[in-house]
Amino acid sequence: LSNDDKLLFKGFYNKMNAHLLNAQHESFSAAYPEVFPRLSYLEHRVESVSGIKNVSYDCCINSCAAYTGGLTNLEACPHCNTPRFKPDGKPVQQYQYLPLIPQLQGQYANAERAALLSSYRARQDPHLLEMTDIFQGKIYRELQKRYIFVNDQTLKTRYFDAPEDIAMGLLTDGFGPFKGPRST
């Protein structure tokens, strides 16, 4: 990365980390364009360098619902009845989603990062009495003993047999943007 890109990405990270609203960023950009480039430029640059495309979804201004799955065609929130669109037809609120698969592909596309990720698990002691990582966890250790079962078939490999296999955990508060409320 060039020094300009590093500075640009650091600014973009700080915007995201501070939960700065797009309107706030654009206000700074209008006042100080040499310090705060337009958000559209930032997003385009991050996308072109990382290869990860940001996906936008309409959502209720009150965070009641995301208009995905069965809610895709709704004009108002099914919970608070707030309109989805402004009079000009634009969404009232959107949230940004960075798909996980391209992020993981990006991690493994870098040889140094791939080596680090692949060796991390191997360096963990699964027999520690004190749990310091998921690799000492009961569920992880039980999965390692089981053969992968998918599409009504038992495969000949166990979970996490290969060094590049990724163990992931996901904790949510019931939020499931892509399926119905009973799927979380």
Image (tube, helix red, strand yellow):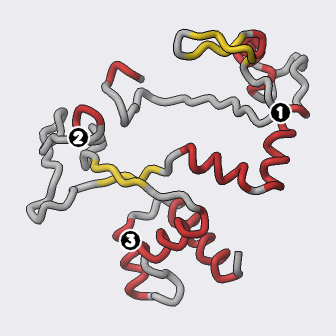
**Secondary element type, mark 3:** helix
Q: On the picture, is 135 further left or further right than 30?
A: right
Q: Nearer the viewer, mark 3 or mark 2?
A: 2
Q: Position of residue 128 (x, y in %)?
A: 89, 20
Residue at the spot 60% in from the left edge and 50% down from the top edge: 103
CA–CA distance between discs 1 and 3? 41 Å
Residue 72 badge: 2
Looking at the image, which is closer to me, 79 or 3? 3
Residue 24 badge: 3
Check the image and report above or below for 135 versus 150.
Answer: below
Q: Position of residue 104 (x, y in %)?
A: 64, 46
Q: Quadrant of residue 169?
A: top right
Q: Amino acid at mark 3?
A: Gln
Q: Quadrant of residue 147?
A: top right
First of labels 1, 3 by sequence position: 3
CA–CA distance between discs 1 and 2? 40 Å
Residue at the spot 12% in from the left edge and 45% down from the top edge: 75
